[in-house]
Amino acid sequence: MKDFVIPDDRDMGTPAKVGAAVTLSVDGFDVTVPEGTSVMRAAAEIGLKIPKLCATDSVDAFGSCRLCVVEIEGRRGTPASCTTPVMEGMVVRTQSSKVKKIRNGVMELYISDHPLDCLTCAANGDCELQDMAGAVGLRDVRYIAPQAGGLANHFEPRSGAEANPEWMAKDESNPYFTYDPAKCIVCSRCVRACEEVQGTFALTIEGRGFDSRVSAGGPLDDFLGSDCVSCGACVQACPTGTLQEKSVIELGTPERSVITTCAYCGVGCSFKAEMNGDELVRMVPYKHGEANRGHSCVKGRFAYGYATHQDRILKPMIRDSIDQPWKEVSWEEAIGFAAARMRGLQEKYGRKSIGVITSSRCTNEETYLVQKLARGVFMNNNTDTCARVCHSPTGYGLGQTFGTSAGTQNFDSVQYTDVAVIIGANPTDGHPVFASRLKKRLRQGAKLIVIDPRRTDIVRSAHIEASYHLPLRPGTNVAVVSALAHVIVDEALFDETFIRERCDWDEFTEYAEFIKDVRHSPEMTEILTGVPAEDLRKAARLYATGGNGSIYYGLGVTEHSQGSTTVMAIANLAMLTGNLGREGVGVNPLRGQNNVQGACDMGSFPHELPGYRHVKGEEVRSIFEDLWGVKIDPEPGLRIPNMLDAAVGGSFKGLYCQGEDILQSDPDTHHVAAGLAAMECVIVHDLFLNETANYAHVFLPGSTFLEKNGTFTNAERRINRVRKVMQPKNGYEDWEVTQLLAKAMGADWQYTHPTQIMDEIAATTPGFANVNYAMLEERGSVQWPCNDAAPEGSPIMHVDGFVRGKGRFIVTEYIATDERTGPRFPLLLTTGRILSQYNVGAQTRRTENTVWHAEDVLEVHPHDAEVRGIKEGDWVKLASRAGETSLRATLTDRVVPGVVYTTFHHPDTQANVITTDFSDWATNCPEYKVTAVQVGLSNGPTEWQREYNEQAQQSRRILPAAE
Amino acid sequence: MSHEKLTRMANQIASFFATQPGSDQAQRVAEHLKDFWGPEMRDELKAHAAADDSDLSPLVRDAILLI
Ligand code: SF4
Ligand code: SF4
Ligand code: SF4
Ligand code: FES
């Protein structure tokens, strides 16, 4: 099996264009390229490299270095090839004595102000300045410094006896890369990358001529103190060693690379893992990755250090009870112990007394095996996934309305949108690469509507301003989305042709009757939602009439008692306005973890076999029964909250939990802890002793995404390859561990490579029918459904009709959550995440990303703070009816009065001690986004936090290995 | 599982279907319970209803007869 591909990612000099074909001749070769292409790129298409410094294909050409000059027949002078567009019949010469002389002069000037320490420079061998000096044949530099004083330059700390005023020290403030001004050639590629690719506008060129410098702004003019979000785009763009990864400085330039997929968020960026032997030197976003198109964020680009963190557990461990310390044992012993216990529990308490939790972080293949373990070896449907706690309402809601549980678009689609609506998502923090792509489109003039209790960064940032921000009261999503629909129906802005063709007309008329009622009008709901009626009306009109309208939503939609209803309300909006089935439109859930989509696709839910088919269906069961040689239970199994309830009740006893930390990520920590404590065998399969492991009896060490083969499916249904770049430090890839357990429990599984698991998935699941590793090798990635009906995969869904046939309008009545504020708990808490940290933070907390977010803080509006005597940075106690915790407060008007906000990345805070067991009506997805709380001053961690830490410390003890 | 929780969940499901047009709401609540709740949870709910159904919404009571 070939797990490596040699990437072709030459720098073409300027970005690709689309347009009519134009043919020209370059050095006597004919080449045909789209209109608008630069002469430089046209030459590159036929393999001719025109020397260049200030151009790179990730940003628009700027034309400042003049190294790329060419001669064009019939034109005077020597135009820069990077800024000259092609013309039909153009005749270009890339070499002549004239251009040679110019290039030589340019290089001479650059080199005269550049240190000549190439041999010891970290970029040696990976520096375009070096390459260009070679390419133009530069042999000597005529500018010689006089004996006494130096020639004015930027690179010598001292000039003669004096300090050189032009010299600036290296900026090493960013944990992952350095900026060495001495090496800067002021090509502005970094500045343009930060603007065009990332959209942060952190960098500028200050000064003019000889004095010009790259500046990060901010009080100290360093990278860490600036607006920089450490995405790495500038480092990527820099042609010299000026901006350089610290890892390369430390480890040397990499000698090989492997294409793989980021294991953090649902964007699913493709990366080149650049290696020296089996040491990872750096991760570089892969240009041909179709989700990210060469961009990345700080997590995927830099935060992989957890893979080699000292906290990682590499040996299996067991213990009889959780008050004992862990004992390190062999794999054989651990697996034997686990299998015997699980089987014992089934004998004693029945077939249904054990279950599994699959991971949204693990690969499709691993997830498939874990649910197969439940269904085919445990012989029950007690399988669930943490997607339960994030996007299960998406599954239900979109399944009901459109017929399938998936986003309708690919990420490229955002390039064609005219009005983007973001509901309950914070893309600049949660899905940063998608946010960059969206921001690019917004800067080109697309409009933005943000529906969120908090003023998220995207509402107003550099060169971007939302047309409308509707700051709704947490818990009133259905009322707001229904009010938007009310305006569209009431003002007859709906797309009748689309509805007649594509939807069930009777259901539409029923729905229209319902939604027209004045109780849904923005004027009536304003008092409830806090959203000004006028703004809401205008936003509705903009979405309905502004061209291609797209909706992107996140956990702010799903994690509510009416999560599923809101998803259906969103689907209604898209159908009403005909915004489905083509580029630039659609309904797009932004998935949290890397493989939430995949985990759902793979049949992790207790009521569904792979491919979203209910276990009650006999034809579906028989497909798997024939293949696996078992009988599958036709009744749904337990969902995570049900498992915990059943555990407390005494009927659920054993759990195999792969790659999830339910104790930290699930709501109502006290209840989760009680459930876990009541079980007799908890098997945690993870990288670290996570919080759940405090209650575990068996710990099976996991492998990182760098150490295994498989696939992830991102939020756009794209199946991307994960490739093993090094051997698993724990000894086994995760799918092998699951197989060991299955075999120890009597199964006859004989997989030797995940490709066989994918073949089994394809053979059983219609949407994956034509997916296999050979195809992924060839094509890079594919979006499901991929079968005989759509052999090339499906970038956009519901193109000619909905998966379920006719689109279904569903009545969406607002029903207030039971979670209400009152005198004891007068504020509403909502939760979220931030850029540098990921979910429960098990990985990112073990990287340098902590410089940006060392702890969770509570955002409080200054008004609410004042009445409670809270000042910036004070320790506060946060209490709800479920529990209390304490953390530091920060004062901000991002939240409206009455609402407080925090993240959930740190176990010390345990924000989920506060969240309650209320959940979505249809799926039991917990209501994380609304909790009534009180906030008051405190003087440090609460009793619970102290007790918790003690228990955790106790539980994490590991006995020294026996000699 | 505590009945408060079971009751709350069942009532919550019913509160959605109660708003839906048509006359088959009880049927749809029953379908939902059959599709998403395991048999043990349904049995518990039934047992609870048999003992005391005063905290169940009318729609849930009707649905229970159908499962
Ligand atoms: S790392 Fe990203 S955000 Fe920071 S300066 Fe570079 S391009 Fe801008
Ligand atoms: S830091 Fe690098 S990319 Fe930026 S101007 Fe200097 S040489 Fe160019
Ligand atoms: S965390 Fe998400 S956006 Fe960042 S690199 Fe990974 S997949 Fe891309
Ligand atoms: S590369 Fe064209 S002017 Fe610099």
Image (cartoon, grey):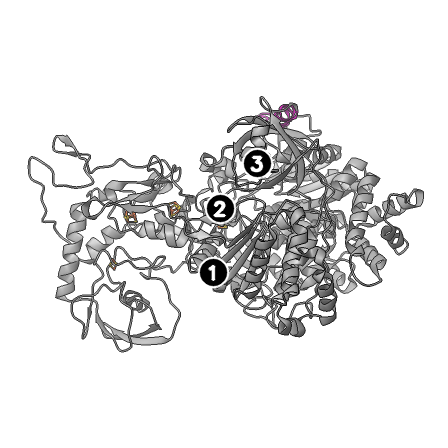
Whether residue A443 is situated above or below residue A929 in the rendered picture: below
Where does label 2 land, which residue?
Answer: A457
10 Å crowding of disc 1: few (<14), some (14-19), many (20+):
many
How far apart, in angstroms, are the residues tagged by discs 2 and 3? 32 Å
In the picture, the quarter occupied by the C terminus of chain A is top right
Under mark 2, the amino acid is Asp
Q: Position of residue A523 (x, y in %)?
A: 65, 53
Q: Position of residue A835 (x, y in %)?
A: 49, 43
Nearest-to-viewer mark from 3 and 1: 1
Q: In the drawing, does residue A3 fall left or right of residue A135?
A: right
Residue range in magenta is A944-963
Front in this rendered view, residue A794 or A879: A879
How far apart, in angstroms, are the residues tagged by discs 1 and 2? 17 Å
Where does label 3 land, which residue?
Answer: A688
Q: Position of residue A315 (x, y in %)?
A: 57, 35
Q: Chain of mark 1?
A: A
